[in-house]
Image (cartoon, grey):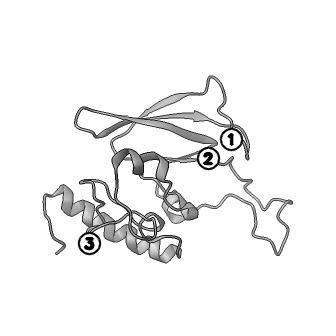
Amino acid sequence: MTQFELLPKPPDERSPSTPWPQWPMQLRVESSHEEGGARDWSVSTVKFTGDEGGRVRQLHGVRVGPPPAFAAQPGTEFTLDADLVLLAMGFLGPVKNGPIAQLGVKLDARGNVATDERYMSSISGVFAAGDMRRGQSLVVWAIAEGRKAARGIDLYLMGESKLA
């Protein structure tokens, strides 16, 4: 498992550019990071490619320069084999001109991805939770929705249509 971040890696200790009482600019390590996997910084995903069945098989990325331009760095392009990609986009809200438009996913009245009780969108096998489904909210809602979506995905993969 690899986690990509568009931003550069923050310093290990509090940055002098964020003195108290400002929110400290420093690397944070959560329990999920300690469980394993790699974290990679200053990476932008360019595209995904898949197989004839529509399943993702590769992520294509490039290293980027510093904000705010995040300019692609020539010669840093790479491809990573993948069979599952999870997008975590924080409080940005759903970006309509990308996978949502390409897939034709239906939106609710607030412009968020509409889902059923399993958190599946209008496209079979495409799920949404947290900010993407609910809009900007608290992280506890995102965690709860992520768990419910994981249950919906599990049921989908097992071929079941209703939540137990």
Tag 2 residue = 6
> Left of 28 or right of it: where is 21?
right
User: In terms of secondary structure, where does tag 1 sit?
Assistant: loop
Give the Cα distance between marks 2 and 3. Answer: 32 Å
Question: Which mark is nearer the camera, 1 or 2?
Answer: 1
> Left of 30 or right of it: where is 152?
left
Please, is residue 161 above or below residue 98 in the view? below
Name the amino acid type tagged 1.
Phe
Q: Quadrant of residue 21?
A: bottom right
User: In terms of secondary structure, where does tag 3 sit?
Assistant: loop
State the residue in front, 27 or 147. Answer: 147
Name the amino acid type tagged 2.
Leu
Mark 3: few, some, or many residues within 10 Å (few <14, many ≥20)? few
Q: Disc 1 or 2, which lies upstream in sequence?
A: 2
User: Residue 42's x, y, as percent?
Assistant: 64, 42
Give the Cα distance between marks 1 and 3. Answer: 38 Å
Tag 1 residue = 70
User: Residue 136's x, y, as percent?
Assistant: 53, 71
User: Residue 120's x, y, as percent?
Assistant: 28, 62
Q: Which residue is located at x 14 percent, y 65 percent?
A: 161
Mark 1: few, some, or many residues within 10 Å (few <14, many ≥20)? some
Name the amino acid type tagged 3.
Glu
Q: Are marks 1 and 2 in contact (CB under 8 Å)?
A: yes
Tag 3 residue = 117
Give the Cα distance between marks 1 and 2. Answer: 8 Å
Please, is residue 107 above or below residue 42 in the view? below
Q: Which residue is located at x 68 percent, y 36 percent?
A: 71
Q: Quadrant of residue 43?
A: top right
User: Residue 130's x, y, as percent?
Assistant: 44, 68
Q: Disc 2 or 3, which lies upstream in sequence?
A: 2
Residue 37 visible in image: no
